Image (spheres, rainbow, N blue to C red):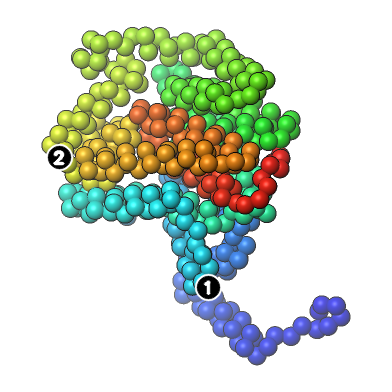
């Protein structure tokens, strides 16, 4: 009943409702384990009809999913776990939404970086087939990796089309909800002395797979939080920045410390008088915190053991010498297939160094070396050009921007991008899906903001 009137179903609506009920009832009797698939359909429809609201909320969940890596099942070498289903859902919903836009005659906005990303993904396709050709059923793992990269691309494309002037602020603020679980988990691990212990050193990783990946995720949000703080001097941004810094210190990630230092110096270069005092204070606080910590000193002592002799003799005294030995092994294998490599995501198959009790090879811990070994000089060139051009267009967008909001946002992301690329020489950051998702969504928001016409000088608290 609505406003005193009785609402009745039309004949057609009543028939459809009855049919839906019958289908759901039959499924619950014949295939009860698949009922959730039927229930998923209206959820997808609701999601799509209010996608500008639900999409950033949905993406905010991604930072909590690494803890469900072991929840799923295997099809050959492919682990179809919860994060994998998240990836499939993103691809499906985004493709459906963009497809409906095209059918309705609406313009799908495409940035030059979207074109670059799409071309790179397309160029990687032959290396999926190369992996399957070289390793048969085990080579199917390359398909999973290709779909993961494709999901990042389509996520970037969808975000760029969803962001508008009226929802930009809400879109960004909802993405900050992704910090809730990782930071809470990280602080819990810090207080209770749980988490990960590596050679007696306590390291936190929150809800992300590894402390190094957690550190890069934190560096991204530290940069964005600092930018938000500049847009609005709200005390909550100061508090959040402090918590993020504490968590970053507790990861005890040397690559994270280096990337944070690069980002801080990069931001310091463009700060006006007075602003640099805050960054300088953060850097001093950061250095003081980890240099006076006994656990950091233990790790630093092992770093000082590194010399030419230990590297030549392949003595593993620290994670860095371990990396060098790993790189030498992979470079020896690369020389056998220098031009085309072994196929996408084949390092776990070919690496002679195996993870104990798992039977798969260690990751390269160097993104550029990964593509050199897996896709040869050809694929390495594709990846290097892609990275260079993304950085170039990001810098170009920053230089062309004339308003404060997008200009400072783009500059911050440029600093994060440079820090990421330097860090990727010693770690597996291209496979850090959590960071990749949020970086490319933030980049889409920044690029779209720069393309919006009108006054963008408003504060964004």
Q: Position of residue 33 (x, y in %)?
A: 47, 65
The C terminus sits in image quarter: top right
Foreground residue, 349 or 450?
A: 450
Q: Is mark 1 on a helix, strand or loop?
A: loop
How packed mark 1 is, by other alpha carbons closer than 10 Å (few <14, some 14-19, many 20 or more), is few
Q: Judge whether residue 137 can be spotted in this image.
A: no
Q: Residue at x 52, y 31 (%)?
A: 219
- Left-right relation of 174 to 304: right
Q: How many marks are shown on the rendered structure?
A: 2
- Left-right relation of 273 to 102: right
The N terminus sits in image quarter: bottom right
Please report whichever mark, 2 or 1, sits nearer to the chain's N-terminal start: 1
User: On the image, numbered disc 1 is attached to which residue?
Assistant: 104
Q: Residue at x 61, y 57 (%)?
A: 52
User: On the image, numbered disc 2 is attached to which residue?
Assistant: 337
Q: In this view, does 385 lie above or below 254?
A: below
Q: Where is residue 337 in the image (x, y as percent from the top left)?
A: 15, 40
Q: In this view, does 364 lie above or below 382?
A: above
Q: Judge whether residue 454 can be spotted in this image.
A: yes
Of tags 2 and 1, which is closer to the observer?
A: 1
């Amino acid at each position: 009943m609505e406003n005193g009137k009785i609402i009745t179903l039309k004949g057609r609506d009543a028939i459809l409702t009855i049919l839906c009920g019958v289908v759901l009832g039959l499924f619950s009797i014949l295939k009860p384990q698949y009922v959730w698939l039927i229930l998923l359909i209206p959820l997808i429809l609701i999601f799509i009809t209010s996608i500008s609201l639900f999409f950033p909320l949905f993406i905010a969940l991604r930072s909590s999913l690494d803890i469900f890596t072991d929840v799923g099942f295997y099809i050959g070498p492919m682990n179809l776990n919860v994060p994998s289903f998240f990836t499939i859902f993103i691809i499906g919903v985004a493709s459906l939404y963009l497809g409906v836009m095209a059918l309705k005659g609406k313009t799908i906005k495409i940035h030059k970086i979207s074109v670059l990303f799409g071309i790179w993904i397309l160029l990687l396709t032959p290396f999926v087939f190369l992996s399957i050709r070289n390793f048969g059923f085990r080579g199917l793992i390359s398909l999973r990796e290709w779909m993961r990269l494709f999901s990042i691309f389509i996520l970037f494309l969808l975000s760029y089309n969803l962001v508008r002037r009226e929802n930009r602020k809400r879109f960004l603020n909802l993405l900050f909800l992704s910090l809730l679980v990782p930071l809470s988990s990280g602080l819990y691990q810090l207080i209770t002395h749980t988490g990960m212990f590596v050679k007696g050193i306590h390291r936190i990783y929150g809800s992300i797979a590894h402390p190094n990946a957690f550190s890069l995720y934190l560096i991204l949000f530290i940069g964005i939080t600092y930018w938000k703080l500049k847009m609005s001097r709200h005390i909550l941004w100061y508090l959040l920045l402090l918590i993020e810094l504490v968590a970053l210190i507790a990861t005890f990630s040397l690559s994270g410390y280096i990337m944070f230092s690069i980002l801080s110096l990069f931001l310091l270069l463009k700060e006006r008088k007075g602003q640099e005092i805050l960054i300088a204070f953060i850097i001093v606080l950061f250095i003081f915190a980890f240099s006076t910590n006994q656990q950091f000193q233990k790790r630093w002592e092992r770093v000082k053991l590194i010399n030419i002799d230990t590297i030549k003799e392949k003595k593993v005294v620290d994670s860095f010498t371990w990396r060098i030995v790993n790189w030498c092994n992979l470079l020896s294998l690369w020389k056998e297939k220098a031009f085309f490599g072994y196929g996408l995501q084949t390092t776990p198959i070919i690496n002679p160094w195996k993870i104990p009790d798992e039977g798969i090879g260690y990751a390269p811990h160097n993104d550029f070396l990964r593509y050199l070994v897996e896709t040869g000089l050809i694929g390495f060139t594709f990846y290097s050009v892609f990275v260079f051009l993304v950085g170039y267009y990001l810098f170009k967008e920053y230089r062309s921007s004339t308003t404060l909001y997008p200009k400072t946002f783009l500059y911050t992301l440029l600093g994060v991008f440079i820090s990421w690329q330097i860090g990727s020489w010693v770690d597996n950051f291209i496979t850090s899906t959590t960071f990749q998702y949020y970086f490319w969504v933030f980049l889409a928001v920044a690029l779209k903001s720069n393309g919006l016409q009108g006054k963008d000088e408003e504060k964004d608290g």
